[in-house]
Image (spheres, rainbow, N blue to C red):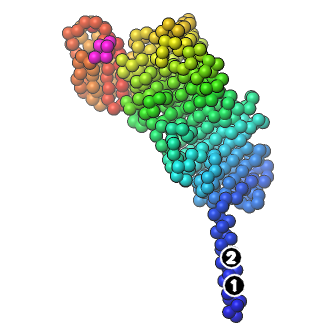
Amino acid sequence: MKNSTQLFLKTTIIVLVLSLTTNAFSATITYAVATGDWSAANWSPQAPVTGDDVVIPAGAIVTVTTDLSAIELNSLSVSGSLTILSSAKLTVLQKTSKDPLVNLTGGMIQNDGTLSITQNIASNNNYGLKFSDNASSDNSFTNTGILNIDLSKRAAAQLASCIPFTQNSAGRVSTMKFGGTININVPIQSRIFELLGTGAAVILDGTYSFGSSSDYKDWRFLHMGNPGTVTIASTANISVYANYTNTTNGVICMNTPAAGNSFINNGTFSIYGGSSTVAYGIYMNTQVASAPCTLTNRGVLRVIGTFPKGAVYVAGNSAGVNTINNLTTSSVMSVLHSEPSFAAIKLFSISTPITVNNEGIINLSTTSLNLGTVGVLNNTGTMNYNTATEINSSIGNKINIYSNNKKIYIKNGSTNDIQFELIDLTGKILNKSILKGESSSIINPSLKGIFIVRLTSSSINFAQKISL
């Protein structure tokens, strides 16, 4: 009896140890039929459990119909099609190092429910959502639900991207369409989107605001350190509110060392710089003669707010010609600084060549477009200088400033008090006062000449040229 009991206990312990060992290490689970529900018995070798690496192969069409958030996947790879319905949830919570956490390899993800992606290992720089290369199929991610990406435990934030694009096979395109709610939790100065594949083609679409006038992000929105093209779709309306504190880069950084890269806006794309921003809006820095950077606008492109080093900054190898295109007669490009003394478009040195081609409308907050001796302007459109600068358009459009050559008349369109400053063209503040909310003010500075009026509060930063 004693021997039998001991044998039973030993056997039980062995089974428990094996069970714990199996759960401690992830298994690779593959969807094994063409079409079906995630919860159906269509997996090989068994249904996914917490800690598993899940693969949806090419040709497979999988739908998540229920709340599966209790099953914390270690990673997810999609070469087929995955749809998360509005009432459904799916969770990827890293258990062991796996790069990336979610991998699109010629696949499609449609998130109408909740998809949560979390790095759970400190100082680990695995990517959150990667668009990997596939020679046969495009990659596509569409969000209309809730997308949570938490990489807050990672290290070397400024060198690690959250969502990289590496699909570079000829004719293949990666598309990400924004919508719903997107919650991104990363260390400061992180790269949110990045071109990693040589020659990658990326389309960003949808309507979304990353941050707001009360929530500026210390992010680099897009890093283009490799050759390729990022296109904002004609149907897109995307805004980025940035308090970016990396002094050597921009909210959009184009600095490929190889065959050049291109940022194309066909829709509406806006970058708003907050008061803490110490860098650039769009940073064009060609590294070698054969690698120019090209910025092309066929829609509405705004770079507005505080960018001390230049809203658009052009630098790099003197033999590589950078190009800014504002094409089609309906294209509008507004490069506006809330600080009158800052340059809107700034050249790093007079030896940095640049060509500006304008067929539409370019609005500048400065008195001119400074292209130096190496810049070429081909203008068949309209150039508006000393354009008023505003961050919050809904409030800014209600503000009215004008003069009768003697006095300044101001109508405050905000319910909050606003600080008034009168500034000469050298940047010197000549007059300062507080204007009460939703009131009209008349200011008589007893001055003559051309000046800048600036109005600031917690929600607006507005500047306009006047004549006295």
**Where is the N terminus found, in terms of image quarters?**
bottom right
Q: Residue 292 falls in which quadrant of the image?
A: top right
Our reading of the magenta stretch's main secondary structure is: loop
Q: Position of residue 329 (x, y in %)?
A: 57, 11
Using the image, determine if residue 355 lies above or below residue 193: above
> Does the stretch in magenta take in 151?
no
Vertical position of residue 382 compared to residue 435: above or below: above
Is residue 425 covered in magenta? yes
Q: Looking at the image, which residue is at 59% across and 39% down?
A: 163
Question: In the figure, is residue 394 to the left or right of 285?
Answer: left
**Which circle marks residue 14 in the picture?**
2
For image coordinates 53% across by 14% down, the residue present is 352
Is residue 58 found left or right of 347 in the rendered image?
Answer: right
Q: Residue at x 69, y 75 (%)?
A: 15
Residue 85 x/y as whole percent:
64, 48
Q: Residue at x 24, y 26 (%)?
A: 434
Q: Is residue 234 visible?
A: no
Give the spatial CA distance, label 2 vs label 1: 10 Å
Secondary structure at badge 1 equals helix
> Mark 2: which amino acid?
Ile
Q: Assign the C terminus to one quadrant of the image.
A: top left
Which label number is shown at residue 66?
none
Foreground pick, 225 / 451: 225
* Mark 2 crowd level (few <14, some 14–19, many ≥20, 10 Å Cα): few
Residue 359 placement (x, y as % from top left): 57, 10
Q: Which residues are magenta?
A: 422-428
User: In the rendered image of this protein, does residue 151 appear above or below residue 306?
Assistant: below
Looking at the image, which is closer to me, 396 or 183?
A: 183
Q: Which residue is mark 1?
A: 8
Amino acid type assigned to the residue bearing label 1 in the image: Phe
Farthest bottom residue in view: 1
Residue nearest the viewer, comparing 74 with 450:
74
